[in-house]
Amino acid sequence: MSAVLTWLRRRADNVTVALLAAMFVAFILQIFTRYVINHPLGWTLEVCLTTWLWLVFWASAFTLDERDHVTFDLFYLAARDRLRRVFAIVSAVAILAGFLAALPATLDYITFYKIKKSATLGIRLDVVFSVYAVFAVAMIVRYALTLLRLIRGAPAPSHDDAEPT
């Protein structure tokens, strides 16, 4: 199972790199056409915005570890191990409940956007915003597994020893 997860993680990293490369190429092309040949391309901005959206949510869901995300952990790090576990459980439950409660409305909103298309490239907006649904489901799975590990007695992770999820 570990080999499969490692392979999947590497493929997720490949998607992240491809998104970043596509955004960079579109950005450079935008600069070149605007300032060198004085004939800007409108679609490059849309490509940059769409790849940025996908990059942020895809990487947050699949390539970043828990310790890579921004946290407000002053009290968490100051607490002893037992209280830290309680904080971690409460946080996991809150995040899990929030994403689960929002998921039906999120999916409904994304599917509603099938009637609209992007301004320049004509990409259906449900496709553009579908990455958020992928992100939300990944967060649900991540925090459900985190909660399960904590309930089974695993110690709460600190920034130094947070396990990749």
Image (cartoon, rainbow, N blue to C red):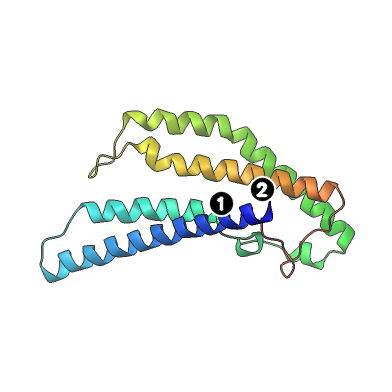
Under circle 2, the secondary element is helix
Residue identifier under label 2:
142
Expressed as whole percent of the image width and height from the top left, the position of residue 27 reads 28, 63
Report the residue at 72% width, 63% height from top.
Answer: 162
Q: Residue 66 at what x, y percent from top left?
A: 65, 59
**18, above or below 100, in the image:** below
- Seen at 27% across and 55% down, the residue is 45
Q: Is residue 149 left or right of residue 44?
A: right
**Rendered-image quadrant of the C terminus:** bottom right
Q: Residue at left 57%, top 34%?
A: 103
Determine which of the numbered discs, if any, sits on residue 61 in the image: 1
Rendered location of residue 10, percent (x, y): 54, 59
Disc 2 crowd, CA 10 A, few/some/many (<14, 14-19, 20+): some
State left or right for residue 9 relative to residue 82: left
Question: Local crowd at mark 1 within 10 Å, few (<14), some, or many (≥20)?
Answer: many
Give left or right: position of 62 versus 113.
Answer: right
Q: Quadrant of residue 24?
A: bottom left
User: What residue type is disc 1 on?
Assistant: Ala
